[in-house]
Image (cartoon, rainbow, N blue to C red):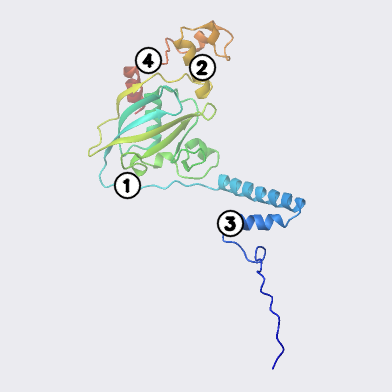
Amino acid sequence: MFGAEKIDRSPVCFTRSVPSDDPAELINQLVSGMSLQEQRDLMVTLLDQRAATWLSDMRAPRTPTLLRKPRKVRGFQVRLDLRFTKPPVWRRLVLPGDLTLSELHSVIQGAMGWYDSHLHRFRVGAEHNAAYFITEFDLDEGEEGIVEDQVRLDQLIADVGDRLWYEYDFGDGWDHVLKVEKVLSQPPGEVQLLTGKRACPPEDVGGVGGYAAVAEWVENGYDDTLLPEQFADGRHARDWLPVDWHPAEFDIEQARAGVAREA
């Protein structure tokens, strides 16, 4: 009744009309249809958005999360390491769980051998922008947050492997990590310094890099060819260093006296 209709049975290409399930292919399809200038504008926009997100994350207020205070105070055996030092500088301590962070700061100063002449900060993560607790100095500067003297150690650590980070001297950037080795059913009557390795670096030596250079010079018999660049000559360096300082020597009795004095 009707005339025969010729039907085109050749294959149809859907490359441009049907979106792919592959994100990379979708991006290729999108970008391939752009001019070079449009591609450049897209790249600038994406980078600007990424930078804005990064800056927003950096500026965002970070409040540490606290554990509930346990009904019973326990003790913790911990190892305190000065990060990035090789060989590592470390101390092993036994601490009561109800020690406040401000008290722990004093204990760390005594155990390590620092002079407490710079600012410090406790963090709950390894990154320097991790949530942290503010000090009295921060309060005076108008900063808001959780003050360290209102926080107990057992509100931050509870199990073997738990960590807490402590930074001293933001210029030299002495970064420490405290790691729980044992959880004790009873807290110690007082802070105990069990052992440790290597001397505390000299204050204001220039961070881990400056310390490494000074340690190498001393350990190699004050070799003039290894004199750290911050010193004019060997005599200047010897006068600047603490009396009888040697990086490999840890005076545990002196450190214990420091802990007792600060605790």
The residue depicted at 49 percent of the width and 42 percent of the height is 130
Query: Disc 4 versus disc 3: distance between alpha carbons?
Result: 58 Å
Identify the image quadrant of the C terminus: top left
Query: Disc 1 versus disc 2: distance between alpha carbons?
Result: 44 Å
Q: Quadrant of residue 92?
A: top left
Which residue is at the front of the view, 106 or 239?
A: 239
> Residue extending furthest left?
185
In the image, which is nearer the foreground, mark 3 or mark 1? Answer: 3
- Residue type pointed to by label 3: Pro
* Residue 69, numbered label: 1
**Few, some or many residues within 10 Å of mark 2 (<14, 14–19, 20+):** some
Label 2 belongs to which residue? 213
N-term-proximal mark, 1 vs 2: 1
Query: Disc 3 versus disc 2: distance between alpha carbons?
Result: 50 Å
Which residue is at the front of the view, 42 or 116?
A: 42
In the image, which is nearer the foreground, mark 2 or mark 4? Answer: 2
Q: Secondary structure at mark 4?
A: loop
Label 4 belongs to which residue? 249
